[in-house]
Amino acid sequence: MHGIERVLDEVERASDEIVQYTRDLVRIPTVNPPGDEYDACSQFIGRDLEARGFDVEYIAAEGRPEHTSRHPRINVVGTRRGGGGRVVHLNGHFDVVPPGGGWTVDPFAGIVRDGRIYGRGVCDMKAGIAAALFAAEAISRAGVPLPGTIEISGTVDEESGGYAGVAHLAQIGRIAAGRTHCVIIPEPLNVDRICIGHRGVYWCEVAAHGRIAHGSMPFLGASAIDGMGRLLQLVREELMPQLTARRTAVPVVPAAARHATINVNGIEGGQPVDGIQTPCVADTCRAIFDRRFLLEEGFEAAKAEFDSFVRRAAADCPGVSFDLRELMVVHPTRTPDDSPVIAALQASIRRVLGRAAQLIASPGTYDHKHVARIAGLPHCVAYGPGELELAHQPDEYCRIDDLVNATKVLALATLDLMGVTS
Ligand SMILES: [Zn+2]
């Protein structure tokens, strides 16, 4: 039997172990926020990596404000060195969003039923971590000599921006151009799809300031709520249709997200609605805007455009002034079309699933941005088991056959990237 076939065989044989490992991970409730059980989870992954012959480092996010004694931010990185060839890094975040309501099973029991594993974070993305780990394990069990180095990391806080996780590893040079050849992030994007990037994010807070007056004589004041209302009206009637008319060439899914978008994530103004009532014209109103911009638009243009709408609202509302505060900017990323990491996954998906891979991009954002922007590494994609639509939902699950197939694909792609193709 050729090396590649032996590897596929070893993954198949390890199916039950892969499922068990995923269930064990799901049972560690690494809920973020606030960042529970990170230490326990990094230790669990680290001990396992060590037992499988990896050198293991625990990397705390020293210097980050969210790294506290109550909720330490601890990442784990395992390294298995082969020959002097490429370094292939498989990265998975182990934090999960809170379970929320609507579950019909215990979200942290790791229940297996009808060929699926259920639990919060099972597809996003503890199954992905299991797939990465058993991809490496199958290569070693198959006795295929490794001409390069495999790194597997479990990181924190992806769900809250990844600053103490992948961004930290990139900042300290642990993931870096020149050191790392490529990064594959096994996020749940469906077993035959390769995610090559995401749109940009521009979050800002707009505060409207008016003039307080007695609510019985509103003409004596200037309502900040009316000012914000004018801005919302301009956004809805003029900006939104313009954004919808713009379309990116990047293959974002779902297709409706192939356009630029804007959402109002929250708004508050005037007196507290549930407090003691006093009649006043609102002197403040704040709203959070969530603008997703396209690679073709660029951040500067998106920002300048939004600024112009705020200025127009101010001009239309005498007595009301506006402040704008930037909360978060994420630039769009796109893996180069000729990246070897895309080619390796395409070939492996064809071999394992017998069909062509689809290239997609994410409507949101994930840790890819830190690899591209901070580590300066262009060769990064997301590929992993599980369905995107199930992430963050009640009764989240991952199909076991997807998990096993994704493990095979990751094993073959890792070898392909190191030059082993038969
Ligand atoms: Zn995720």
Image (cartoon, rainbow, N blue to C red):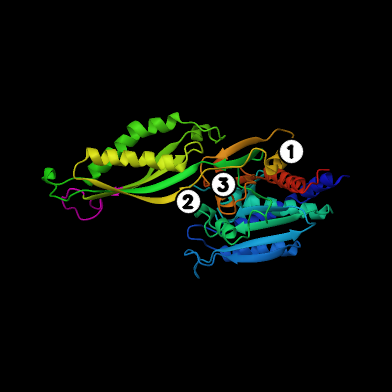
**17 to the left or right of 102:** right
Give yes or no for residue 398 being in the magenta stretch.
no
**Magenta range:** 268-282
Answer yes or no: is residue 98 visible: no
Q: What label does residue 396 carry, if any?
A: 3
Q: What label does residue 6 carry, if any?
A: none
The local crowd at label 1, few if under 14, some if 14 to 19, many if 20 or more residues have their Cα within 10 Å, is some
**Nearest to N terminus: mark 2 or mark 1:** 2
Distance CA(mark 2)–CA(mark 3): 11 Å
User: Marks 1 and 2: in contact by CB < 8 Å?
Assistant: no
Type of amino acid under label 2: Gly
The residue at which mark 1 appears reads as: 347
Distance CA(mark 2)–CA(mark 1): 39 Å
**86 to the left or right of 249:** right
248 relative to 172, above or below: above
Question: What percent of the width, then of the height, locates residue 336?
Answer: 63, 40
Distance CA(mark 1)–CA(mark 3): 29 Å
Magenta span: chief secondary structure: loop
Taking the spot 83% from the left edge, 54% from the top edge, the residue there is: 145
Type of amino acid under label 1: Ala
Type of amino acid under label 3: Glu
Question: What percent of the width, then of the height, locates residue 407?
Answer: 71, 47
333 relative to 156, above or below: above
